[in-house]
Amino acid sequence: MTISLPPEMAKQVEEVSRQESRTHSELVREALRRYFCSRFPVATASRAELKAITRSRAEVEQGHFVTLDQLLDDLASAHRKPRATRARKNPR
């Protein structure tokens, strides 16, 4: 991987690397790790969440689930208004 840095930033990398007796790669890797951790924090599931996930997986393995199509159909039918019934004409 090759990157380009503005001259001032390259000088800073060189200086910090020398002061800390680290390679440029080590310095950049640490900077990226810190960036990723601050930008994309890792969430850890609680015990209750892990238990719920385990229980849900067991239910899926037993066949207790609905497909996305079934769920969407159920949601759509719940929002449909029932049709008004019309009186039929009596045939003569």
Image (cartoon, rainbow, N blue to C red):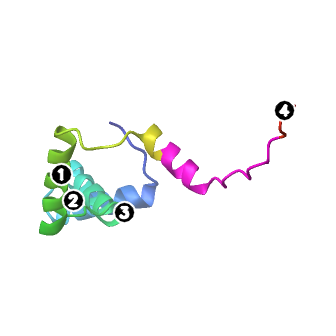
Q: Which residue is mark 4?
A: 91
- Counting from the top left corner in percent of width and height, residue 50 is at 15, 60
Residue range in magenta is: 72-88
Question: How many tags in the picture?
Answer: 4
User: What's under tag 2, amino acid-wise?
Assistant: Ser
Cα distance between the residues tagged 3 and 4: 73 Å
User: What's under tag 3, amino acid-wise?
Assistant: Arg
Query: Is tag 3's residue or tag 4's residue first in the polypeptide sequence?
Result: 3
Marks 3/1 in contact by CB < 8 Å: the verdict is no
Residue placed most toward the observer, 84 or 31: 84
Name the mark nearer the viewer: 2 or 4: 4
Q: Is residue 75 left or right of residue 53?
A: right
Cα distance between the residues tagged 3 and 1: 24 Å
Secondary structure beneath dot 3 equals helix
Q: Would you identify the image quadrant in which residue 92 lies? A: top right
10 Å neighbourhood of mark 4: few (<14), some, or many (≥20)?
A: few
Q: Which residue is mark 2?
A: 17
Name the mark nearer the viewer: 3 or 1: 3
User: Is 74 in the magenta?
Assistant: yes
Name the mark nearer the viewer: 4 or 1: 4
Numbered tag placed on residue 39 in the rendering = 3
- Residue situated furthest front in the rendering: 92
Secondary structure beneath dot 1 equals loop
User: What's under tag 1, amino acid-wise?
Assistant: Thr
Q: Which residue is mark 1?
A: 23
